[in-house]
Amino acid sequence: MRIDIISLFPEMFDGPFGHSIIKRAREAGLLIVNIINPRDFAYDKHRIVDDYPFGGGSGMVMKPEPLYRAVESAKTAVESNKRRIILMCPGGEVFTQHKARELAAYDHLILVCGHYEGVDERIRQYVVDEAVSIGDYVLTGGELPAMVVTDAVARMIPGVLGASDAAVHDSFYSGLLEYPQYTRPREFNGWEVPEVLLSGDHAKIERWRRKQSLKRTLERRPDLLASCVLSEEDAKLLAEIKREQSGC
Ligand code: 4FV
């Protein structure tokens, strides 16, 4: 997969994309990340990329021309019929694991990072395919959201997480919160590891983990429980959890 990111601050990406899993994925050629600075497409003497909002108001708005040309340069640089152009902004569809899996099916993503008060509306209207938000809060720029999307999508690329099925055990993969994880030592500060995990009985361990995921999701994110597909076994486990919670 190739991800072109349109940003006025290319250096911001050095850190997050220069370490660990993303760095290895890039070195392995599983992921190409390229940052394009719209200022390189501002041809006036002062290379202006933002201007005052029509109609007045505080702050500056990113101009359409440098952004348009930057996106066009990314489109012409790569032959692709599975491309998605996304504007990172608070008004977009809220990003989820489901969205990450959907975007991982493309082979070319172009992520447009706004800054200041945002980008000229004609970019959202005529240049991008969709807008995506990482959450209902306002950031100083679209760079952090672009990093979040890149990280979550990269994990879904086969081979990026090493063990091919690692992502399958993800939180949210099954729509439930993840089960608790433990590692050595067995006892720490008098804090024990649940016996079942040391039993070697994989069926019991799988059942315990599924029950823990259901219990956590019921307690912390019942909204998720409502939207995921539960098996017969899950229904039995949920009844068991509720009985235990009601002390019966
Ligand atoms: C944002 C978000 C976000 C808004 C104005 C950048 C800022 C500035 N993007 N999810 N939340 N963007 O706050 O994606 O241009």
Image (cartoon, grey):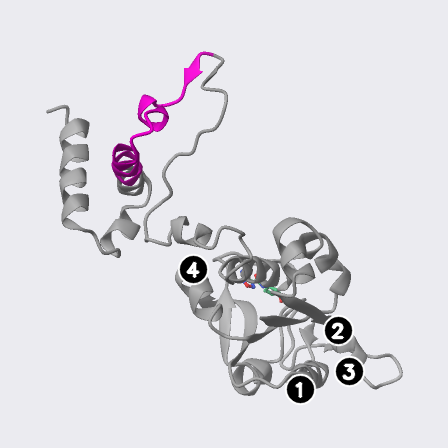
Residue 90 higher or lower than 50, as above or below: above
Residue found at the far front of this picture: 200
The residue range painted magenta reads 190-212
Comes first in the chain, label 2 or label 4: 2
The residue at which mark 3 appears reads as 41
Query: The disc labelled 3 sits on which kind of residue?
Result: Phe
Residue 96 got which mark?
Answer: 4
Query: Residue 21 or 137: which is nearer the viewer?
Result: 21
Secondary element at image label 2: loop
The residue at which mark 2 appears reads as 37
Residue 123 lies, in percent from the top left, at 59, 82
Q: How far, Cα to Cα, is label 3 from label 1?
A: 10 Å
Q: What residue appears at the point 75 percent right and 64 percent down from the top-left corner?
A: 9
Label 2 environment density (alpha carbons within 10 Å; few <14, some 14–19, many ≥20): some
In the image, 241: left or right of 11? left
Residue 110 lies, in percent from the top left, at 60, 75
Secondary element at image label 4: loop
Comes first in the chain, label 3 or label 4: 3
The residue at which mark 1 appears reads as 72
